[in-house]
Image: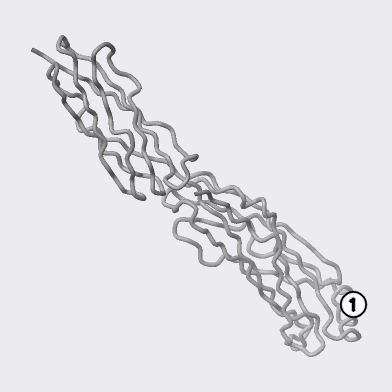
Amino acid sequence: MSFSPVSGQKNMENHSLSGDGWFSLDSVITISWSGNATQTPLVPGGAPRIMNLTITYTTVLSYPLIGKIIRYYCMATHQVVTVTLELGEIPSWSTASLSASEIQFPVSDALSSQNVSLSIAVDEHAPAYALCVIPIHAEVKTLRGPIGLIPLVNGCSQTATVTCLPGYLPHIIVEPESDHLDVVPGEMSHLYFNVINHGNAKTVVKAEIIDSPENDWNVMVTDQIVLDEEGGSNFAFLYVTPPFDFSGTDTITVSFTPYMYDDMSQHGAPVNVTIAVIFEP
């Protein structure tokens, strides 16, 4: 199974005709960003990702003749509106923040844009490839005339949604039954490893012997186990049969490598464990 990251919507627009005044201007707010900013999955527990949001504001005429007069008045008197930005509810395993909560725009007939940075991070408990939805609310209040009664520019609000995905976190803990194994020459002895998933997805762990005594030793290990999502555990076993002439101490090193269950192309660094093999006559 493969996963396709969910990109952010490249443009969102909400044109609100609030009707607060029968001849006032109407506000239009647009929030946009590059879809490339959310293509790559976020690293669980990694540094925050910073993406740029472009906030664009303009006004449109409710009634052309009177609207033009109001717009001219607003431009001549340098009227401004304040756009308030805030984030909605986000997953408990994520954090997000905006570089500004309020930005001001002049009232005019032209598009005016400003950039705001959105910082996003996910922690180690973020489920791999679970959808992280970040709502961004933008609102502009109605701008009223000098005596506060006549609305000059109607307010509006909208919500844009940034979506991103946490990536796979391959993290296992390997706890051997002991750091040594007492053996008898010519007989099979065994030792277990408790392998615990501290990552964020179902995981396959492949084990292999990477170092062992030469000559007539027979050494085997459970080659593959499956761990359920975070906290899941399973046992791998090491089987050792030393030759009849063995005496003293030697070592065996086993390597454990975690792979994402649904996509074996994603894997973590191997965890190596060395066990001392001992026979004292």
**Image quarter for residue 29?**
bottom right
**How many labels, in total?**
1
Q: Residue furthest top?
A: 245
Q: What residue did someone put label 1 on?
A: 72
- In the foreground, 70 or 11: 11
Q: Quadrant of residue 169?
A: top left
68 sits to left or right of 43: right
For the point 24% across and 33% down, the residue is 237
Check disc 1 and report its element: helix, strand or loop. helix
Q: Residues within 10 Å of mark 1 (few under 14, many from 20)?
A: some
Nearer to us in this view, 28 or 83: 28
**Residue 233 image position (x, y, % from top left):** 29, 45
Spot occupied by residue 47 in the image (x, y as percentages of width and height): 53, 44
Q: Residue 179: x and y, percent? A: 22, 26
Q: Is residue 224 left or right of residue 50?
A: left
Q: Residue most toward the left?
A: 281
- The front one of 274 and 136 is 274
Indicate left or right for 143 with 138 as reference: right
Residue drawn at (28%, 12%) of the image:
214
- Residue type for callout 1: Tyr
- Image quarter where the C terminus lies is top left
Residue at 20 percent across and 24 percent down: it is: 180
Residue 231 image position (x, y, % from top left): 32, 48
